[in-house]
Image: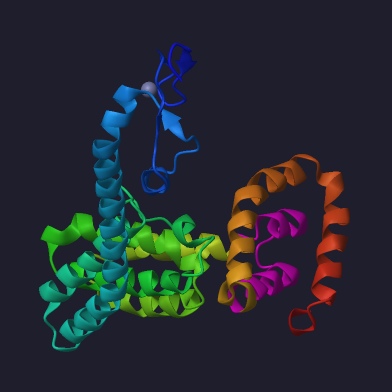
Amino acid sequence: MMGMAQQCPSCGNTTENLIKVDTGKKVALGLTYDEVCGSCYEALPSKISQGMKLRAEEEAKQKNKIALWKGRVELIKQARNFMKSRAWSEAAITYEKYIKVLELIYELEPNGLTPEVFSNDTRSKELTLVVTVYWDLLRIYDQSTRTHDRMVNASKKLQAFGPYSGIYPDIVRKAESFVRGAKNPAPIREFLKSANAGRGGCFIATAAFDHRMAPEVVSLRSFRDETLARTRWGRTLIFCYYRVSPPIARSINRLPFTKPAVRAILRAFLRILPKYS
Ligand SMILES: [Zn+2]
């Protein structure tokens, strides 16, 4: 080996002596080569301990996430018990903790939870849980003018998450009755307003049939709320629909001659859904 200049596969420096790395170290570092230069060889132990440290940190982070994920059910239970015993502020604090846990698990900014977080996730049942949490928070924060901002936020979240949950129609009905006795009805009215707009939110159908109460539009809405919103693939479909349909609806309105064709397609679609036709 003497006298022959070789390149170290680790640092790329030229050296006359490459030193063999033993198999244990090779595996520990995931090296793809057998020999390194003298200075790289000396650096190996610290590299190994650094790698182990990083791996241990990553493992601890994952373990912490799993613990948080498991613990969140307990938080919901606690919060609901606080609700039952009318300990409103404790319930709110515990629910907010639950939201915080989701933000940590999904590595989101504060208040960064959106329905999209759950769209490609086997945990999409969580959506319904989140809706019940924001519904409870909305009612708790209604009790004081000091929590008005939090109430507005809960209303916004409810508007965002509601349509993707099977319990949406129930929550809307509850909100309709709750708003009558509410201390701060405005944020609840905002939620109801968006729910009503969403009811007309079969944008394409509304554009094609010119009216959001047209029987076909009503049927398609029931299909969305009663069937699609209750399954995971259905919710994914709703996500996509809300993304693509407003521009399509605008085109249909701009090009009214397309309406009969779109109506025919939607009617044909409804015929394969016997429950709704
Ligand atoms: Zn080297």
Q: Report the span colored magenta.
A: 201-226
> Looking at the image, is 246 positioned above or below residue 135?
above
Q: Residue 241 colored magenta?
A: no
- Residue 261, how many percent across, how many down? 88, 54
Seen in the image, is 18 located left or right of residue 264?
left
Q: Nearer the viewer, residue 135 or 125?
A: 125
- Residue 274 position by quadrant: bottom right
Determine the main secondary structure of the stretch shown in magenta.
helix
Q: Nearer the viewer, residue 53 or 194?
A: 53
> Looking at the image, is 202 positioned above or below residue 178?
above
Q: Nearer the viewer, residue 76 or 153?
A: 76
> Looking at the image, is 224 positioned above or below residue 193?
below
Seen in the image, is 72 located left or right of residue 227?
left
| Residue in view at x 11 percent, y 81 percent | 87
Seen in the image, is 105 located left or right of residue 240?
left
Q: Nearer the viewer, residue 179 or 140?
A: 140
